[in-house]
Image (cartoon, rainbow, N blue to C red):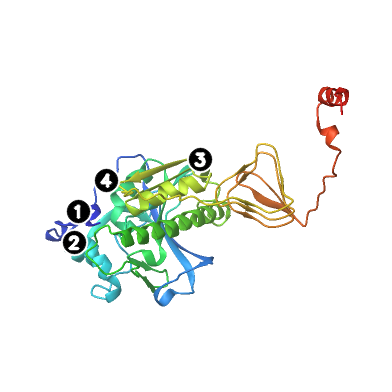
Amino acid sequence: MRVVLVLFLNLTAMAQIKLPAPTGPYPIGRQMLLWRDSTRLEDVGPQSGKPREVATYIFYPAVASGDHTVYYPGLAGLETAPETRPLRLQFGAAWNAVTTGTIQTNTYAAPPMPSGSARFPVLIFSPGGVAPVLGYQLQLEELASRGYVIFALEHGTDSALIIRPDGTLLPYFSRHAPGNGLPTTANLETEREQVIRRTADVIFALDQINAVGGRADSIFHHRLDLARIGVFGHSEGGKTALRACQLDSRIRACLNQDGEMFNQPLNPPESVLLEPHVWVGQEAMLLKGSHVGTGSIIGAKALVNGPIPPVSAAAGLPAKVIKRGVSWDRAARPLGNELPESLVALASALPA
């Protein structure tokens, strides 16, 4: 994964380093948010049993205002801390430049967005392996300068290190078995599980982005074009982007940057289960993994991609429960009434 940071390997010989200027028309803002998903718990290490945390660095079109951001904030005093070891391995010889603040970014610290009411398309970025999203700033700055709002995600204990806004640390915890890093069957399975976790992070982030865009106190209030959402990523993040596209219809485009699949399907087959006494409307679709409880009603043209509880009515794309405690009945009719009249007449004319 060090390949994404190769541009920094010779920077330590320079007194002051400035990232290349983006080519788009907009100045760039950057800020960080931390979200906690109480519906999903970490399953390893000291964070086991605690809510999954997803950090995002937001790169966005902005007004040039205030100071430029620190390339990698929060590292002062952590240069040799055990929690930063994954970062040291990623940045290699550039680590000193990263920690001493000698790299100047092109982003401003949390400035306002440009005046007006224009809405900007949204991109979600997932990095490769344990590579930090701030190691991709050249790419993210360029996209933001061209009018995109990018939410670059750090994925809980799958990330190299999350430095929370209060300064506390969420370190990386490896789920890989000890070995030489070659793509063994066990390692590929571990990576597949990581893609599943990351994909859930992306879908969770989509909900949070929608909330951010709707908050009156947010600079993104009514400035995000949520009808134009794309997801892209590098390596593990690329595979995550593909899987998120498969699962969430809000995503209109996706890009996999060098995410090797090793012939491992991201969407293995699953059963579809319909319990007794279920009414499925015309042209409804039930995807794998669907489970519709007894007594439920699925509306016409609905798209079911998960569990629907018993005695519930569900509709929409994707299907959501719109009413609970429903009941319905279809009275039995004589067999003859279910046949076309011509066939009923023919049957009555035949000898017994």
Residue position for label 1: 6
Q: Is residue 18 visible?
A: no
Q: Residues within 10 Å of mark 1 (few under 14, many from 20)?
A: some
Residue position for label 4: 21
Circle 1 or circle 4, nearest the eye: 1
User: Does residue 316 lie above or below 83 as drawn?
Assistant: above
Badge 4 element: loop
Q: Residues within 10 Å of mark 2 (few under 14, many from 20)?
A: many
Residue position for label 2: 94
Q: Quadrant of the N terminus?
A: bottom left
Label placed on residue 159: none
Mark 2 or mark 4, which has the lower sequence index?
Answer: 4
Foreground of the two, 298 or 242 = 298
Mark 2 or mark 1, which has the lower sequence index?
Answer: 1
Residue 321, given in percent of the width and then of the height, sits at 68, 52
Q: Is residue 209 visible?
A: yes
At horizontal 19% and vertical 52% (from top left) the residue drawn is: 7
Q: Quadrant of the C terminus?
A: top right
Circle 2 or circle 4, nearest the eye: 2
Residue 92, given in percent of the width and then of the height, sits at 19, 63
At horizontal 70% and vertical 41% (from top left) the residue drawn is: 281
Badge 1 element: helix
Identity, as a three-letter code, of the amino acid under mark 2: Ala
Q: CA distance from mark 2 to mark 3?
A: 39 Å
Mark 1 or mark 4, which has the lower sequence index?
Answer: 1
Circle 2 or circle 3, nearest the eye: 2
